Image (spheres, rainbow, N blue to C red):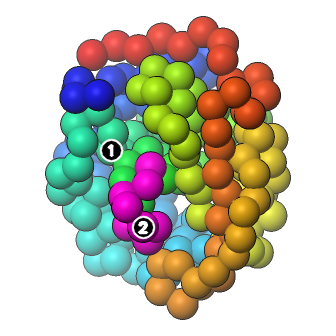
Amino acid sequence: MGSEQPILATDHLTLEPLRADHAEPLVDLFADPELSRYYPGDLTRRENAEGMVRQRLAYSGPPELGHWAFVRDGAVVGLGHLRPSWELPDELPEIGWYLARTHGGRGLATEAARTLLRYGLSDLGLDSVWALVHTDNTPSLRLAQRLGFLRVGSGIHYGDMWHHVHVALPGRTPGLFGSLECRS
């Protein structure tokens, strides 16, 4: 580890390290109440969404980890992270994803999350990647299952919200190790 956070390319998306010019499109994206439904703060309130984006832009962890904007045809359509967890012990690597509903149902969230997971487990050689998924967030629970995450528990995380705790391990994640293009 120790390298710079790369740009990750998939068949349909570019995952760009989060930059200030992504902030406004992300604030607009979170104006949809469904996108903040499982988030502890109401991101439909502009000041809350701006604060969430500022917090992510201020990330100061390992430089090869962080937050990525999901970009399709030049437009920001989502947000993801692979970074030390804010909720789990020992700064375990945690993955998360948000995709605009207008882009749902096309496999883009799966494509983006699979790419971040592959980057973490294969390229960086992480021992594990963890995901905290709200217990009522059926689409994200299904996505974690498709990616081969193992559910290992439940608990209150990110405020007072119940989440299932999942882990992905090298060699236990089906379909993970295909081609991945990284650009610095």
**Residue 66 bears which disc, if any?**
1
In the displayed structure, 12 sits above or below 138; it is: above
**Residue 89 bears which disc, if any?**
2
Instruction: Tell me the SS state at disc 1.
Output: strand
Tell me the magenta residue range: 86-93
The image quadrant of residue 58 is bottom left
Give the quarter of the figure containing the C terminus: top left
In the displayed structure, 49 sits above or below 56; it is: below
In the displayed structure, 7 sits above or below 22; it is: above
Q: Residue at x 43, y 55 (%)?
A: 92
Instruction: Tell me the SS state at disc 2.
Output: helix
Q: Amino acid at mark 1?
A: Gly
Is any atom of residue 76 visible in this view? no
Mark 2 Cα shell of 10 Å, populated few (<14), some (14-19), many (≥20): few
Is any atom of residue 182 visible in this view? yes
- Separation (CA) of disc 2 from disc 1: 18 Å
In the foreground, 177 or 126: 126
Q: Residue at x 23, y 62 (%)?
A: 54
Residue 123 percent location from the top left of the image: 46, 20
**Side of 86 relative to 30 (left or right):** left
Count of number-bearing discs = 2
